[in-house]
Every structure is written in C-alpha cells, then in structure tokens.
Image: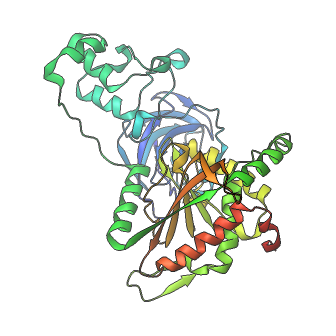
Amino acid sequence: MSIDFILPDIGEGIVECELVEWLVKEGETIAEDQPIADVMTDKALVQIPAMHSGVVEKLYYKQGEIAKVHSPLFAMTPEGGSNDTVHSTPAEALQAETVKVSPESPVAPTAPVACDAIVSSTKSDNGKALASPAVRRVARELDINIHQVAGSGKKGRVYKDDVVAYSQNGSSDLSTVASGGDLVGGTSVEPIRGIKKVMATAMQNSVSTIPHFTYCEEIDLTELIALRGELKEVYAKQDIKLTMMPFFMKAMSLAIKEYPLVNTKVNDDCTELTYFNDHNIGMAVDSKVGLLVPNIKQVQSKSILDLANDIMRLTNDARSGRVASEDLKGGTITISNIGAIGGTVATPIINKPEVAIVALGKLQKLPRFNEQGEVEARSIMQVSWSGDHRVIDGGTIARFCNLWKSFLEKPSHMLVHMS
C-alpha cells in the first residue's frame, strides 16, 4: 500500500524549503537511508534520506517549488507492505547528512544565486543539463527542453542567454541573439529564496534599525606576513592551512578583553545591553548558495592552530553550501574579508544583533617612511569598522581598533596577552 513520506523538521524555525533536485524518479526502487532529494532552507542545503526501502510512487513537488514542513514530500510503497505514514526524521539526523557530503561531491542546484554558481550534474556524467535553477526556470517559461540547448559555459554549462538564443533561432548561437534588437532590454523575474532571502531580510533589518558609523584605519602587516611565512610550510606538512585569518581573530579576541563593549548585543527597544563572555567571531564567506556567516566559537580559549583548523572546516562547509546550523548561530562580532575579492575600503553592514563588524581590504605593497625617514615598501591593509552608534562611540571603536592593530603589527606582543 502506498504511504506518504512527511517532510520532517529540518531546523529551528524552518517551515518551508525549496525543492532543489530530486535524486530519484517515480517507479524507482530505493533503499533505506538512500538520498531522496536536496532541499534548500534559509540556512543551508540539506539532503533528505529515505526512512524505509521500497518503491517511489509519486513525487509531490517539481524542482524549484516550495515544500512545506510536515506535509507529504513523496509517496512510496515500502517493502513488506507497511501502511503506516512515514514520520519525521529528527533534525539532528538531517544536519548530520549536510556535513557528510564531501567537498568533492557534485553540488546540486539551489535557489537562484549570483553568477549562477550552483549547477547540477554534467551531461557527460548522467545526461542532465548543466544549468542553475534560474536558467531552468527560464527554459520552462519558454517551453524549451533544456537538454537540447548547447551550453556556452565551462563543461557545457547552459546560461540564460543560451536558452534565449535557442528560443529565437532553434540554436544557442549567441552572436545571433546579440544582433537582435528585440531582445535588448528584456527582463526576467525570479523569487528571492533560501540564503539570499535570509540575507536580504537581515540586511534590511540591520539598516533600518541600527544607526551605523564607519571608522577606517590602515594596518602594516609586514611583520605578521613574515611570521606566517616562517610557520606556513611547517604546518602545511600537518595538513594545516595557516592563513592570516587566525591571527586576525586571535588579535581581535585579545582586544575584546580590554573593550568588551564591542562584543555585546542590544535589545530592540535599546534598554538593555548584553555582554557575551564568549568571543564567537563570524567570518563572511561568499559561498555557492549566497553569503554565509559561520562563526568560530570561544575564540578566547583557542590557539592560532585551533583557529586555523576551525576556519578550514567552516570555509569548506560554507563554500559547499552545507554549513551545520549550529555554526551559523551565536555569533558576537564579524569579520568580512572583502579584500580577498578586491577593493580597499568598504562600509560593512552590521550583522544584527551584533554591534560591530570589520571589513578587511586587499593587501597592498605601498611606500612608507621608516623611523630613519627612508622610504621602504611595506605590506599595508585598509580596514573599515562599522559600529552601532546607539552603544558604541567613535572613541571606543578607535581605541579598540588601535589595540587590535598593535597586536597585528607586532605579533610578538600577542604572546604576553595570551592566557
């Protein structure tokens, strides 16, 4: 007898998710714990496993549609003919699934994201078109079989222009489309979902409720870069990737001990200020599913090497879009390394309910005068702080930044402050 598989609780407060991709077909025989579907919540990409072995009878949602928690996801006939409804899987089990997937595994398509970064499996692997959900949606709207469209991207990836070209000419010749004036100025509409929806809501709330002010400074990282260079090769043999970020985090934690005000949160009506004992420092990651801000817990009690390992893990998880929800909760202050992409100065938006955030600019070799008045090349980074002006004034952020800067410019000074 056919029974329904009920979409389980996926995480705290999550009531719906986008059906990213079915990993099975109707009529297919499945085994217990076999991955059935990839869904995108407002936290991460989650894989739904089968609770029982049996045969898939009906898939209730199409790719890109929104599935409701506690509603039927698909129908199946279990082995043995059980007629019980398949109940919810514990959220912890699903979170475990999200981190089991290795970075080398193909990443399923997700909610529309910048640059169409998320794609499905390649045609050469399993016959599926290599395209993002946004492109697939355009193909459906134009009533085009996307498998017939020749992609112009890497490994045959299909872009929206390829689909539009095919609809106009029966082929994917983009040069023909470019010459057609009728297509200029065309528009397409896509819903904001998943991680991008959360980011949009969070940023809107932050801007509308927090009076921001920005403070900029430059930091001479010449000595820190030399120290990292000495240590990097040593720890690389232990599979530890020693970047600059662990030093930035540890120095920030040491500065927070002297200026705990920057590691607080304020309530909505600005009548209470909560000081956090733990320094849970977030790092903004430009992931495949949008902007994610996982955080390192208890930085104040960790070594540089501990932080390096945590940063490697979270960076890999974030870039695959499969960060555990626990890693996204509880942040107290944030670092945005925008300089890794480019740019020197930014105006970062505070990650509410935090009260401070810093953006790191790109590292530059610039001429500076030494103590003897001679010009020499130094490794300079511009940093931009944004503070919540309801609780932090300019003098506080300046003094805090100066202490943080002193640790980074003279990394040996960090040693006497570490406990």
Taking the spot 65% from the left edge, 32% from the top edge, the residue there is: 104
Quadrant hosting residue 306? bottom right
Instruction: From the viewer's perspective, tell me whether residue 311 is left or right of residue 89.
Output: right
By what rule are the colours in the image chosen? rainbow
Camera-side residue of 359 and 181: 359
Establish if 99 lies above or below 305. Answer: above
| Residue beneath the point at 63% across and 41% down | 33
Residue under the point 68% across and 78% down: 257
Q: Is residue 318 visible?
A: yes
Apparent side of residue 19 relative to residue 81 in the rendered image (left or right): left
Residue 138 spot, x, y in % from top left: 28, 29
Q: Which residue lies furthest to the front in this view?
A: 373
Q: In this view, does 356 lie to the left or right of 59?
A: right
Residue 177 falls left or right of residue 62: left
Tell me the quarter of the picture where residue 236 sits: top right
- As drawn, the residue found furthest toward the left would be 182
Residue 200 vertical placement versus 153 (above, below): below
Please state the horizontal and vertical placement of residue 378, each as a whole percent of the image.
65, 49
Q: In this view, does 166 lie above or below 327?
A: above
Quadrant showing the C terminus: bottom right
Tell which of 417 and 191 is nearer to you: 417
Residue 205: x and y in percent read 35, 67
Residue closer to the observer: 411 or 300:
411
Q: Quadrant of residue 302?
A: bottom right
The number of discs equals 0
Q: Which residue is drawn at 60% across and 52% down?
A: 380
Residue 279 visible in the shown view: no
Residue 413 vertical position relative to residue 194 in the rendered view, above or below: below
Image coordinates of residue 58 in percent, x first then y, are: 41, 35
